Image: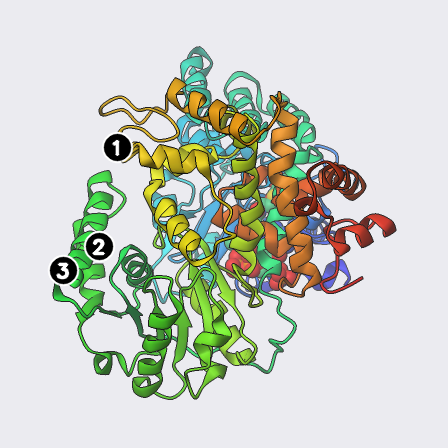
Amino acid sequence: MSENELVRLERDGDIGVIVVDNPPVNALSPGVPEGIIASLNAANADPAIKAIVLIGAGRSFIAGADIRQFGKGRPRTPLGQRTYDVMDAGTKPIVAAIHGYALGGGLENAMGCHYRIAAHSAKVGLPEVLIGILPGGGGTQRLPRLIGAQKALELIVTGRHVPAPEALTLGIVDAVVPEGGNLRAAAVAMARAKADIRPLPRVRDRNQQVAGLAANPGMFDAMRKSIARKARNQKAPYNCILAVEAACTLPFEQGLAREQELFLELENLPEARALRYAFFAEREVARIPEVTPDIHPRPIASAAVIGAGTMGGGIAMSFADFGIPVKILEASPEAMARGMERIRNNYATSVKRGSLTEAAMAERLALIEPVSTFEAIGQADAVIEAIFEEMGPKKEVFTKLDAVMKEGALLLSNTSALNIDEIASVTKRPQDVAGAHFFSPANVMKLLEVVKGAHTSPTTLASVMKLGRDIGKISVACGNCDGFLANRSRAPFSVETIIMLEEGALPEQIDKVMLDFGYPMGPFAVGDLAGLDIGWASRKRRAAENPNYRKQPISDRLCELGRFGQKTGAGWYRYEKGDRTPYPDPIVADIIREESAKLGNPPHTFTDEEILRRLLFASVNEACKILEENIAYRSSDVDVMWLHGFGFPRYRGGLMHWADTIGVQEVYNQISAWHQRYGSRWAPAQKLRDLAATNTSFRDAKPGRG
Ligand code: 3HC
């Protein structure tokens, strides 16, 4: 496409209107900045044009630089020759007219303009840090001059999107067009009103906002301290702080040069590559081959949840949080009362923390209606069964759902592992049945694993994917197998943690490796938080059913001692009263030593690298089997599940992206070596062999054999 088509200069009387038209979000792809500059030059040179409006066509102003161009080694436009420079040097006022999103380079262009007006629903922000870089188009120098360093620092370091009304209060925009108003007309009127005002108010000249802050380094140190835990192993947040610091200590031009330096340090780091990868992986999940453009998802205006337990309650909250009325069905009045109490308490905690208002809590609670009969939910557009994980009772529920639900309703099971086809088989409409696996706590965790059964129709699949998005989740689809994609790929990780204990590794040692890698908590600390008794009960049940069930003597001994985790003051760690800090416990170390000796395991010293690789490679191998069996559509779907379901550090991209940074060949060699040493559980997946043989990355792996 030529520059002229990406950006055009229109006229509205004496106002030149520069329209950026690069669908879907007007990213600053090659040709767009050049087009803006050409239009600015033309408008400045035209005596009939008194003032200029910069606006986006379609659904957004400008969503920022074209992220696909990063890391490609393209030459950067030299300082002094960019759109902002032409704006700064211009002789006529420019009004940025913002609707949809003005993000990153989009907001930077808006800040290059002399005035900014936004639609009521618009959002602005500098989210570069979320893709591992910093605002490299003057954003770190202009935003502090516009709204002060303290507020700019918060916005640049968090990358959060700011709604237009807040942007007005902060001073990022000068006016907001009320809902239903005409942004373009308002921007043209503003441009006309400002046409004769001189000097032109350039953001770069507002030095009074940053003057004197050089003497307040405490603000920057405090920010570094406050992000230390969350931003560990990352560089971008720290470079963001340095860049804002430069805005306060250096003249504008030198500040821009410093911003460039700090930007270039980041663009090609593994952290930035991983975050860009995660951005596109999260969008790729929506592409499902059988969901062709002619398939239209069914709208979901009402929902029902079966079961008022922790999961059912969390799912009901997820609907209410997004304004969708939901009925919650529980047979026993006591269980229902407990469930509703839990929901009320959860909301009350948010109110106490200040993240929810009393009024919003009341609105959400009003959307959740407790009911006690199946007949009462028959008209819901979607129903999610969230009872305990047993096939018999689930089938009973689906038999009843088949009898009462209206035609076309989505019949969904929140199972985390059970066969969705067997559940669907008791209905006369298996095409409407699918898995909708939420992660705990369901109202908080972003992941929705959508499980496609053998008979699930493409419309149902598309509808569940959309339902997930409608309630703020990232929906990832997969096929039907024991544990589906998420839990099946995670299971070998859990097995390996236990086996390493049996070989003498200590919980604190394993947890530290995973914490250093970037997980918010290690697996044993998580176990203590969740409670060890649930796993113990399930192990006892499985052992009774299956004489070959592999025992977990160390975990069992802890539970036999009443060590169920934080709630009993001891589990894998010991805890002091009122303190959640996990302290290593010599009693646990003794149990590990004894059980390890009983199993005949020779003493073994683990390196951190061995621990990390054993845990994660085990899962990479399983993910290869999952791909091979066509359970996953692509390897990046595994990554999205690990990022949003299991707390995998985002700046490492996801399990498979991380494995790619090590290299498929090395992963294969290591797994093969462990196969020799530890036996069949480490047998390399055929898919892994194939990828290694053809030196194909996990990213490029196709599902199926070969
Ligand atoms: N570059 C390239 N493609 C982009 C893009 C960008 N900045 N922003 C969005 N897209 C693409 C998406 O990949 C998607 O493509 P697809 O349809 O082929 O999958 C399409 O546009 C639509 O995007 P979404 O599905 O995400 O649409 P939403 O409406 O849900 O969200 C959005 C819109 C909030 C703008 C979201 O896309 C987003 O957050 N985009 C990234 C914004 C960003 O990070 N901007 C800063 C870029 S870096 C920068 O500007 C550097 C500068 O300082 C030098």
The answer to the question of whether label 2 and label 3 lie on touching residues, with beta carbons closer than 8 A, is no
Q: Residue at x 73, y 50 (%)?
A: 34
Residue 326 appears in which quarter of the rendering? bottom left
Tag 1: amino acid: Thr
Q: Is residue 327 visible?
A: yes
Label 1 crowd (10 A; few <14 / some 14-19 / many >=20): some
Which amino acid, by three-letter code, is at mark 3? Ala
The amino acid type found where label 2 is placed reads Ile
Instruction: Quote the CA–CA distance across marks 3 and 1.
Output: 26 Å
For the point 57% across and 18% down, the residue is 250
Q: Earlier in the sequence, mark 3 or mark 1?
A: 3
Q: How dense is the environment of label 2, judged by Cα within 10 Å: few (below 14), some, or many (20 and up)?
A: many
Give the structural element (helix, strand or loop) at label 2.
helix
The residue singled out by tag 2 in the image is 343
Residue 20 in view of the camera? no
Residues marked 2 and 1 touching at CB (< 8 Å): no
Q: Would you name the residue on which mark 3 appears?
A: 337
Q: Is residue 297 above or below residue 321?
A: below
Q: Quadrant of the C terminus?
A: bottom right
What is the tally of numbered marks visible in this picture? 3
x and y percent of residue 676 in the render?
Answer: 76, 39
First in residue order: circle 2 vs circle 3: 3
Mark 2 CB within 8 Å of ligand 1: no
Look at discs 2 and 1 and give the one toward the viewer. 1
